[in-house]
Amino acid sequence: MTFIESLGAAWAKNNSLLCVGLDPDPAKFPAHLKGRPDAIFEFCSNIADATADLVCCFKPQIAYFAARRAEDQLEALIAHIHAKHPGIPVILDAKRGDIGSTAEQYAVEIFERYGADAITVNPYMGRDSIAPYLAYADKGVILLCRTSNPGGSDLQFLDIGRDGQPEKLYERVARLVANDWNSSGQCALVVGATFPAEIARVREIVGEMPLLVPGIGAQGGDVQATMDAGRTANGTGLMINSSRAILYAGKDENYAATARRVAQETRDTINRYR
């Protein structure tokens, strides 16, 4: 199945719009894992095993692995999720964005080396920098649009309208992706939960396209406002990400069970507003 097909199947099978972000910080691991050479894999795979029936996707952030020379553990983690939880797509949060020849190598890295089902990318350099990812028609390409961080407004909210017609930069990105770049139907957009009005605007522009929504949990985004703004007519269309609030809810050897409880509470909260 393609990424979009797998996502749709996971929405239905698990009755979930929850995406669990896998951002492993060894300083926050339970004491029994600290100092182990495979601690990152062990921590993340246990979280994945405990929550796989509650999510629509997982989203490991590549920087947390690369900073600790743990790329081999990232490869093993994605392979583990695919083997143990088939049908749950894995988004590798890498936010790549470079010229076409370099992007071709990044695409090989993400899709062939790591085996990810989708990647986050930066659209700033235009379509030719995105084309190498789009060439993998079964994979998802998730483009930054209106991000959850406060500084996102420095550029994304600039008015770039012409001929008296106002248009924000994030709106131009949404329109470009929906109308010009998504010819294979494999694209999605990142829109932060901290900006529900912009989620609604993006939804208006892109129709049924999936939105990856960071910013609930530790970043304080409101679940009801996010759902009201972004869900599609059938109550799907969203991958609502929570990372730290789930990963580090537990502090002891039962951390995975605690993470499961918080993930279930989060999924059920989301579902109340579907």
Image (tube, rainbow, N blue to C red):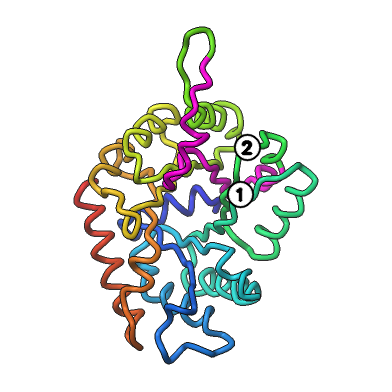
> Which quadrant holds residue 62?
bottom right
Image position, residue 228 (x, y; %): 25, 39
Q: Is residue 12 visible?
A: no
Q: Residue at x 31, y 73 (%)?
A: 249
**Would you say 267 lies left or right of 21 here?**
left
Residue 123 coordinates in the image, percent (x, y): 61, 38
Mark 1 surroundings: few (<14), some (14-19) or many (≥20) residues within 10 A: some
Residue 259 at x, y = what percent? 33, 73
Which label sits in the foreground, 1 or 2? 2
The range drawn in magenta is 132-161
Please state which amino acid type lies under the numbered disc 2. Answer: Tyr
Question: To which residue does mark 1 refer?
Answer: 138
Residue 149 part of the magenta segment: yes
> Where is mark 2, residue-wise?
124
Three-letter amino acid code at the position of disc 1: Asp
Name the one closer to the observer, 134 or 11. Answer: 134
Q: Residue at x 56, y 59 (%)?
A: 92
